[in-house]
Amino acid sequence: MDPQWIPARVGDALHSVDTPALILDLDRFEANLSRLMNAIQGRAVRVRPHAKSHKCVEIARRQIAAGAIGICCQKTSEAAPFLAAGISDVLITNEVIGQRKTERLAQLAASFPVSKVGVCVDNTRAVTDLARACERADSTLDVYIELDVGHDRAGVTAIEDVVVLGQEIGMHRKLSLRGLQAYFGNAQHRRTPSERRDAIATATSLARRAKAALVEAGLPCEIVTGAGTGTFLLEATSGVYNEIQPGSYAMMDVDYAKNETEPSWPAFDQSMFILTTVMSRRKDALSDRATLDAGLKSFSTDSGPAWPAFAGWQVRGVSDEHTVLERIGAGNELALGDKPLLIPGHIDPTVNLHDWIVAVRNDRVEAVWPIDARGAIF
Amino acid sequence: MDPQWIPARVGDALHSVDTPALILDLDRFEANLSRLMNAIQGRAVRVRPHAKSHKCVEIARRQIAAGAIGICCQKTSEAAPFLAAGISDVLITNEVIGQRKTERLAQLAASFPVSKVGVCVDNTRAVTDLARACERADSTLDVYIELDVGHDRAGVTAIEDVVVLGQEIGMHRKLSLRGLQAYFGNAQHRRTPSERRDAIATATSLARRAKAALVEAGLPCEIVTGAGTGTFLLEATSGVYNEIQPGSYAMMDVDYAKNETEPSWPAFDQSMFILTTVMSRRKDALSDRATLDAGLKSFSTDSGPAWPAFAGWQVRGVSDEHTVLERIGAGNELALGDKPLLIPGHIDPTVNLHDWIVAVRNDRVEAVWPIDARGAIF
């Protein structure tokens, strides 16, 4: 996008930032990074935050400075800007299928020979395709077998297939079997702690059996990786997982705020917001409404719309470039031109709609970061 | 985004296009453009397609070649690439509020002095802000008063306020009052023809009264503009509207396909698809599923998920980068690496997730067009 449309400059006051814009409250963001690291301190668990949530090199650098060992991504094109920025350990927590895609991945690994690049598989054909592409590009890949631990989307379901895949990986000199990808995605948003505990107990049991089968077959399984913001401490204390992949914890969203949490767990603060402008205002006998200049092209609604970060208003309707708020009680007045903040419903696809993160401290812009992997779907 | 990730080159076969990718079937697209122009032939109605649906200069050029008088947009930054490409009549069908935004709009108009640039207002303060910005930038703007004809989102509700606004606009030498913006957005998807007829009858009646009030006050009202793909022929035959703004008609989506249409209306074909890859496949006693490499970051789900363009399968789940299909009957076999097509649930926010439109004829890539205004939310 044309750089003339950058929403802010360093030093700007928050209220002068152009809208709609993603605002990152740096104090809250930094506290979230610390809370995660403190929660797992002393445990033999590595943190590999999921960069699909933020897609931003600067955030990844701060996560690594706080103690993360690298990052993970969902797509080859998403991994590229992080590798180009010098991040030395990037795992694609996803299958990469098809000749063109495997060749691009192998070439990417060849371009950054000092970095570790990992990928997941759940099919032997994919293993041979990756091996062939790596031979051609003269590169190596770390390979993780994706185990379906309940998410029901991709991954191997039968333990015997894990061993077959492990043996296939072991035959190729350019591929290194590192372990298991065992992510239980839809457990993250189960609302009660006991539902999440039950889910991760199942996942842990499956991962333990799969790891034992690999070891018994003489195959390596150094890393068992998975987990998200809703369950990470369960995996971290499982005795089986030794790497966790939380993403949303750094920014949070409305959907995660609906989870009941255990008192002993760290409470992550909402640090990412959408700054909007009141572009139309109506207050008469029939209605008390404020229409904002942000809609479906500024936040995703798959987990519900973005929601006011202040009392007294609710979302009445969302269209491409508008959100209509209506008053439901006491709270802020909203006048034409005011700039209220919304909380994203689901942080990952919301960030993907923006080109810039405006990083703010004490209502002053401290930095403007590009969302480097925005739109990186290949 | 890095140009290395362009999904196709001219001459590629459809099945070699990288995924997920937006595919435009050119035969169907061109037929849609003709159908719209044929439907209003002989009527004193101008066509100003809504470019918020496609955000693509090449599509706008083809719409104008087919007879459109220009385009409309929702944001100033969205208008910019179309003006820069030489499109000489661009209407922002939306309010532009705040000093920074009005200044940018006035400067944009100054940058393209031979083009018409229009904007909507529903508040007198916005009129004075625009006038001041245009004085400073030495530019002129066409101004339309937005009338709320039922969409209930922005716009003036009382006829007397239309006149007050018209008088305010008339006081400023850099602003030209052109007429009324009278779009009934949520009428587009009312499912039966009679519901849509009732809605547009109301809208027409309000627009007629507002126009009469302006004329009676000695103010101009040359253009009454509005309408979308679901209702455009109703406005076109209303005797009040003399400009229509359909956008989706050129591409279509699942949501529009659910409308019951009248036999006398043109039937627009689905011309835009999402090409995906089967990245994981499961077929056992418990399940028959294909997981595709496109999810919330490749299509919007606000009007339901993208849907298979073929029989025998339904969507079971969607996550950031995955769609899980499950078999529900006879139809295509789907093997690992196959590239099935999905139909977008809602075309506008889906296009906004992509950087490229791959234009195809007879399963061969004829062109690859940038989505110039992707992410243009300012």
Image (tube, coloured by chain):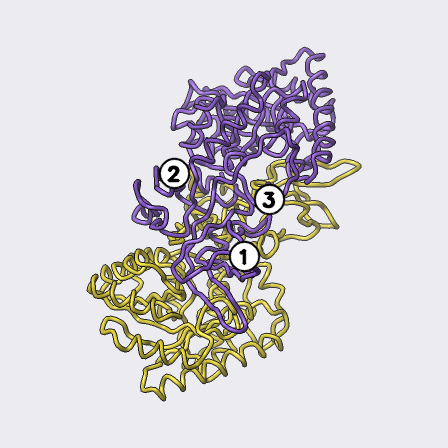
Chain colours: A yellow, B purple
Quarter the C terminus of chain A occupies = bottom left
**Amino acid on which disc 3 is placed:** Asp
Q: Quadrant of residue B145?
A: top right
Residue drawn at x 26%, y 76% is A171
Q: Which mark is residue A70?
A: none
SS state under label 3: helix
Task: Please tell me which residue lies in front, B221 or A144.
Answer: A144
Query: How far, Cα to Cα, is label 1 from label 3?
Result: 20 Å
- In the picture of the structure, the residue carrying the numbered disc 2 is B361
Residue B65, can we see it? yes
Q: Which tag is nearer the camera, tag 1 or tag 3? A: 1
Mark 1 on the same chain as mark 3: yes
Label 3 environment density (alpha carbons within 10 Å; few <14, some 14–19, many ≥20): some
Among the two numbered marks 2 and 1 on one chain, the one whose residue lies closer to the N terminus:
1
Query: Residue at the front extreme?
Result: B330
Which is more N-terminal, label 2 or label 3?
3
Seen in the picture, residue A6 relative to B93 is either above or below; the reply is: below
Q: In the rendering, which numbered label is found on residue B312?
A: 1
Q: Is residue A218 above or below residue B207?
A: below
Q: Which residue is mark 3?
A: B255
| Labels 2 and 1 share a subunit | yes
Q: Amino acid at mark 1?
A: Gly
Looking at the rendered structure, the secondary structure element under dot 1 is loop
Residue A64 placement, left or right of B223:
left
Q: Residues within 10 Å of mark 2 (few under 14, many from 20)?
A: some
The disc numbered 2 marks a residue on which chain?
Answer: B
Task: Kindly identify the residue that appears in the image at 69 percent across and 23 percent down.
Answer: B207
